[in-house]
Image (spheres, rainbow, N blue to C red):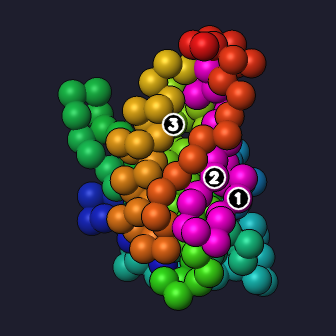
Amino acid sequence: MINITDTAQEHFSKLLSSQEEGTGIRVFVVNPGTPHAECGVSYCPNDAVEKDDIKLEFGLFDAYVDEESVPYLEEAEIDFQTDDMGGQLTLRAPNAKARKVADDAPAIDRIRYIIEAEINPQLASHGGQVALAEFTEEGTAVLQFGGGCQGCGMADVTLKDGIEKTLVEKVPEVKGVKDVTEHQLGENPYY
């Protein structure tokens, strides 16, 4: 479920050595399955372990995950990279904002998953997002832009070169995309 690299395991072992005996770590997702999902890691002393927690053993320490977070931490990885300032711990959880769907799930579910797990995180760096408004019988994914993408002069490029390319490649049922956003109503209208 969660891969903790060797360097991250060493880092956690050092941190935990100054804690109460038996203290592990807790890996969790706040607001799982939403665009506002956030992942975190904290200390988990013995008295904070819940009966429904999933226990993951990592040699020198144990990691605990609450039952609700489990599906959103599939394919998650925790890494620690050293640098001049000491180091940086990173937690990458590609399924935190959307629960991973099976390869044989309905096309509409796979489209929504790719939008939430891959496309929206990239758009978020520019203050934008996109949502699936409809998936037609002809294979057109009808999309609605929002945030910084609504009214952006680059929305057409993002739509064709980024979103359409990704969806067509990853969901064979998608034949194309269509933007139904009223861009002139955005904060930066280009019409």
Is 42 left, or right, of 182 in this rendering? left
The secondary structure making up most of the magenta span is strand
- Tell me, yes or no, if residue 61 can be seen here: no
Kindly report which numbered mark, 3 or 2, lies closer to the viewer in this rendering.
2
Quadrant of residue 33 in the image?
bottom right
Q: Disc 2 or 1, which lies upstream in sequence? A: 1
Q: Amino acid type of disc 1? A: Glu
Q: Where is residue 101 in the image (x, y as percent from the top left)?
A: 57, 77
Front tag of 3 and 1: 1
Give the residue type that dot 3 points to. Answer: Leu
The amino acid type of the residue labelled 2 equals Val
Q: What stretch is highlighted in magenta?
A: 131-151
Report the side of 31 relative to 10 (left or right): right
- Residue placed furthest toward the front: 138
Real-space Cα distance between discs 3 and 2? 17 Å
- Measure the alpha-carbon separation of dots 2 and 1: 5 Å
Name the residue: 66% across, 24% down.
183
Image x and y of residue 6, in percent: 27, 65
Quick one: SS at disc 2? strand
User: Residues under labels 3 and 1: Cα distance?
Assistant: 20 Å
Pointer 2 residue: 142
Numbered label attached to residue 134: 1
Q: Nearer the viewer, residue 102 or 179?
A: 179
Q: In this view, does 101 lie above or below 140?
A: below
| Residue name at image x 63 percent, y 52 percent | 142
Q: Which of 49 and 70 is in front in this view?
A: 70
Q: Could you tell me which residue is drawn at 47 percent across and 40 percent down? A: 159
